[in-house]
Image (spheres, rainbow, N blue to C red):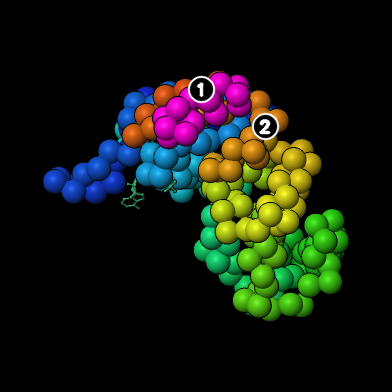
Amino acid sequence: MSRLELTGVTHAYGVGSARREVLTDLSVTLTEPRIGVVGANGSGKSTFARLLNGLVVPTRGTVSVDGLDTRTHAKDVRRRVGFCFTDPDAQIVMPTVQEDVGFGLRRRMSKSQVAERVAAVLETYGLAGHADHPTHLLSGGQKQLLALVSVLVTEPSVLVLDEPTTLLDLRNTRRVAETVAGLPQQVVMVTHDLDLLDDFDRVLVFDRARLVLDGSPSEALAHYRALMGA
Ligand SMILES: Nc1ncnc2c1ncn2[C@@H]1O[C@H](COP(=O)(O)OP(=O)(O)OP(=O)(O)O)[C@@H](O)[C@H]1O
């Protein structure tokens, strides 16, 4: 597993009177295979997730992945840490399924190698019959799966998922959950769906820009439910 390390991290968006601190003085080291992140809307979870692959660079403090600082080694970090957005439309970039899956590989290997790898992963994730399908015609669940597969094909060592099932029905939620459960990679998953975290090794609870609990799924979920008054 990789070592994801945040040291003295504070992050704010905006400046002057518009400055809004969304993460405050966060230090945490993550080495477990399965890490969940929960918290209220606006508590800083997405910002935390984006810090892990350098999509967001902290205002103060450092974030590193296996010793690589996201500020100075952005490219290496992004190669190791794959990121899946809540909304798959934010990352589906090509007109057909196979082109989209091959997109992240085009600079690393020859056309025939890309075609071979793409065919193999589409088969593995049950999308083989959709290779030539226009991406904009896929269902929400298929799009989410495609976004996940397009990241997995690049073989990241860590996968960060920001609310990957929010837009999905129960069947597709299960499908994504099963796919994620079977991955050899380290996974960091932000979610409001607490059931997805039952078997996780560690769950972080955020509240108003702070990490307020870091523990087992049952401890974290009890704390989160109490925070939510549920
Ligand atoms: N690019 C940005 N510019 C300005 N403010 C931002 C930006 N991104 C997020 N914010 C603000 O930062 C705060 C924390 O947002 P963040 O998305 O990290 O929270 P979250 O816990 O993931 O919320 P949610 O559960 O609603 O997705 C929110 O108030 C949000 O409006």
Question: Is the residue 227 above or below the residue 110 in the image?
Answer: above
Helix, strand or loop status at disc 1: strand
Label 1 packing within 10 angstroms: few (<14), some (14-19), many (20+): some
Percent across and percent down for residue 130 are 78, 72
Q: Is residue 226 magenta?
A: yes
Point out residue 21 in the picture as x, y percentages from the top left corner.
28, 38
Residue at position x 62%, y 76% in the image = 136
Q: Disc 2 marks which amino acid?
A: Asp
Q: Give yes or no for residue 51 being in the magenta stretch.
A: no
Instruction: Compare marks 1 and 2 and give the one earlier in the sequence.
Output: 2
Amino acid at the residue labelled 1: Asp
- Per the image, the residue denoted by label 1 is 214
**Nearer-the-camera pick, 9 or 213:** 213
Numbered range of the magenta stretch: 216-230
Q: Quadrant of residue 26?
A: top left
Residue identifier under label 2: 198
Q: Quadrant of residue 125?
A: bottom right
- Viewer-side residue, 119 vs 228: 228
Residue 65 in percent (x, y) is at: 55, 33
> Could one spot residue 72 in this view of the protein?
no
Tell me the residue at 71%/38% (across/down): 185
Q: Which one is nearer the viewer's eye here, 21 or 175?
A: 175
Q: Which is closer to the viewer, label 1 or label 2? A: 2
